[in-house]
């Protein structure tokens, strides 16, 4: 039972080649989500953030219109999950890719595979996804941690970005792709804990 060494060049998502961006998980946006249960959305988003931290994946957080006083910050449970001292890039643009500081923060990671969670799917996920794809990034919307103002708006937006080249993924798929091998024992317990919290299974061991 011999595993290959970690690949230097990996077509799959790995802790070494991936960046996670979390966009606009603010009270106004969350309270307007109608494509899934809002409590489940928050829980799922927190799990993805915890997965990123487990595998040491950089997180780029962004909000809209906090500095203008028109909107509240990222909700506390998610702000705490990312880290109270972690940078957050506030914008006036609906499309985060059009904000200079945010754009530079993504590119500064040097990673070309971008996991994205954003509210709403039809705007703040779609627009940066399309722009990032055009600039040569691979973009992976996490479908069970994003939402829209209606199921139709959400599903239509996902179809649009997928047709443009985005690769849809889910929390369980993402977790398995990052773990990849049970011989990587340093993250097995964390994987088990988060997948149990998600409800994918009840204890691996």
Image (tube, rainbow, N blue to C red):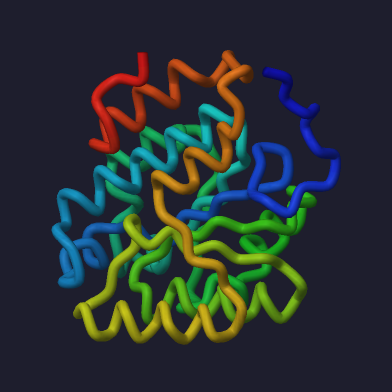
Outermost residue, front side: 1
Is 182 placed left or right of 119 in the picture?
Answer: right
Work out whether residue 67 can be spotted: no
Q: Position of residue 23 (x, y in %)?
A: 44, 60
Asked if residue 154 lies left or right of residue 111, the reply is: left
The x, y position of residue 141, in whole percent, is: 48, 64
| 30 up-or-down from 199: above or below | below
Residue 192 position, x and y percent, is: 38, 23
Work out which residue is located at the far right of the displayed protein and give it: 8
186 or 60, nearer to the observer: 186
Tell me which residue sits at (49%, 46%) in the image.
174
**Residue found at x 71% / y 81%:** 134
Up the image or down, 87 lies above or below 26; here it is above
Q: Please state which of residues 78 and 56 is positioned toward the viewer in this rendering.
A: 56
Where on the picture, by quarter, is residue 47? top left
171 and 114: which is toward the camera: 171
Quadrant (top left/top right/bottom left/bottom right) for the C terminus: top left
Q: Residue at x 66, y 48 (%)?
A: 18
Quarter of the image where one finds residue 84: top left
For the N terminus, the quadrant is top right
Q: Is residue 50 left or right of residue 8?
A: left
Classify 80 as above or below 68: above
Quadrant assignment, res 189 = top left
For the image shown, how many numbered marks are present on the structure?
Answer: 0
What residue appears at the point 72 percent right and 39 percent down from the top-left corner?
A: 16
Res. 139 visible in picture: yes
Q: Position of residue 199 (x, y in %)?
A: 23, 36
């Amino acid at each position: 039972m011999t595993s290959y060494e970690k690949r230097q060049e990996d077509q799959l998502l790995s802790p070494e080649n991936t960046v996670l961006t979390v966009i606009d998980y603010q009270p106004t946006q969350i309270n307007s989500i109608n494509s899934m249960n809002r409590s489940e959305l928050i829980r799922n988003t927190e799990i993805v953030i915890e997965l990123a931290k487990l595998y040491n994946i950089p997180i780029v957080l962004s909000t809209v219109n906090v500095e203008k006083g028109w909107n509240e910050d990222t909700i506390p449970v998610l702000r705490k999950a990312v880290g109270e001292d972690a940078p957050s890039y506030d914008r006036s643009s609906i499309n985060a890719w059009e904000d200079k500081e945010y754009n530079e923060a993504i590119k500064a990671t040097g990673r070309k595979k971008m996991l994205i969670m954003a509210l709403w799917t039809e705007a703040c996920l779609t627009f940066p996804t399309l722009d990032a794809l055009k600039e040569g990034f691979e973009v992976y919307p996490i479908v069970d941690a994003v939402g829209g103002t209606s199921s139709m708006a959400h599903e239509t937006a996902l179809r649009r970005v997928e047709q443009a080249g985005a690769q849809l993924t889910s929390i369980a798929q993402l977790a398995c792709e990052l773990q990849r091998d049970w011989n990587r024992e340093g993250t097995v317990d964390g994987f088990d804990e988060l997948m149990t919290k998600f409800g994918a299974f009840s204890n691996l061991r």
